[in-house]
Image: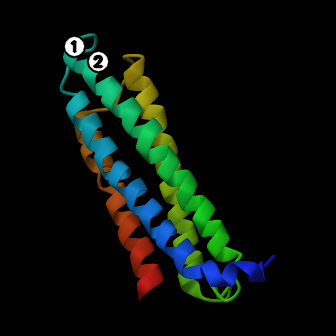
Amino acid sequence: MIIPALTPFFHWLLAFHIISFTAWMAGMFYLPRLYVYHCQTVPGTAESERFKVMEAKLLRLIINPAMISTYIFGVLLILTPGAVDWHAAWWWTKLTAVLLMTGFHGACSKWRKNFLNDRNTKSEKFYRIANEVPTILFVIIVLAVVV
């Protein structure tokens, strides 16, 4: 379904999509780093509790709303005539990377719940490696769209 009435708003939709995506990525770059530091604390300590608050606020107040608005503006762009060439490889590459980023977002949410309940079983090294996933997906998404 294409909505011709969106055409005059294309640049606004694109700008808000980029702003939302940037906010989402900022949070996704930071959250796994918080997990690296959270691993270094003793469960039940004031420091561990502080990380729980930081992680929850980052997810609830920044990452989740930014992801939702990224999707909303992205769908509106898709519905704008001429915005997507459905036969182009870049579109499918970007979509795949965005879906993988969404899955990683879900994994980060699960890991936060484990920390919240003092049930983290993953190592600091695991989170250091996981911290690179959003960067790799970010590069793929940007390159797919721009190049």
Residue furthest to the right in view is 1
| Horizontal relation, residue 145 to residue 57: left or right | right
Whole-percent x and y of residue 8?
64, 84
Q: Percent from the top left, x then y, of residue 35?
A: 29, 35
Secondary structure under the numbered disc 2 in the rendered image: helix
Q: Measured along the vertical axis of the image, is residue 70 above or below residue 46?
A: below
Q: Which residue is mark 2?
A: 49
Q: On screen, 51 above or below 65?
A: above
Q: Where in the figure is residue 42, as x and y percent of width and height?
A: 21, 16
Q: Is the C-beta separation of discs 1 and 2 under 8 Å?
A: yes
- Check disc 2: other Cα within 10 Å, few if <14, some if 14-19, many if 20+: some
Residue 101 bears which disc, if any? none
Amino acid, disc 1: Ala
Percent across and percent down for residue 10 are: 59, 80
Q: Nearer the viewer, residue 122 or 114?
A: 114
Q: How many circles with numbers are drawn on the protein?
A: 2
Q: Quadrant of residue 5?
A: bottom right
Q: Quadrant of residue 58?
A: top left
Rendering colour mode = rainbow
Residue at horizontal 65%, vertical 67%? 75
Q: For mark 1, what is the residue? A: 46
Three-letter amino acid code at the position of disc 2: Glu
Q: Quadrant of the C terminus?
A: bottom left
3D distance between C-alphas at marks 1 and 2: 5 Å
Q: Residue at x 43, y 64 (%)?
A: 19
User: With 132 as the anchor, is 116 left or right in this view?
Assistant: right
> Could you tell me which residue is drawn at 22 percent across and 13 percent down?
46
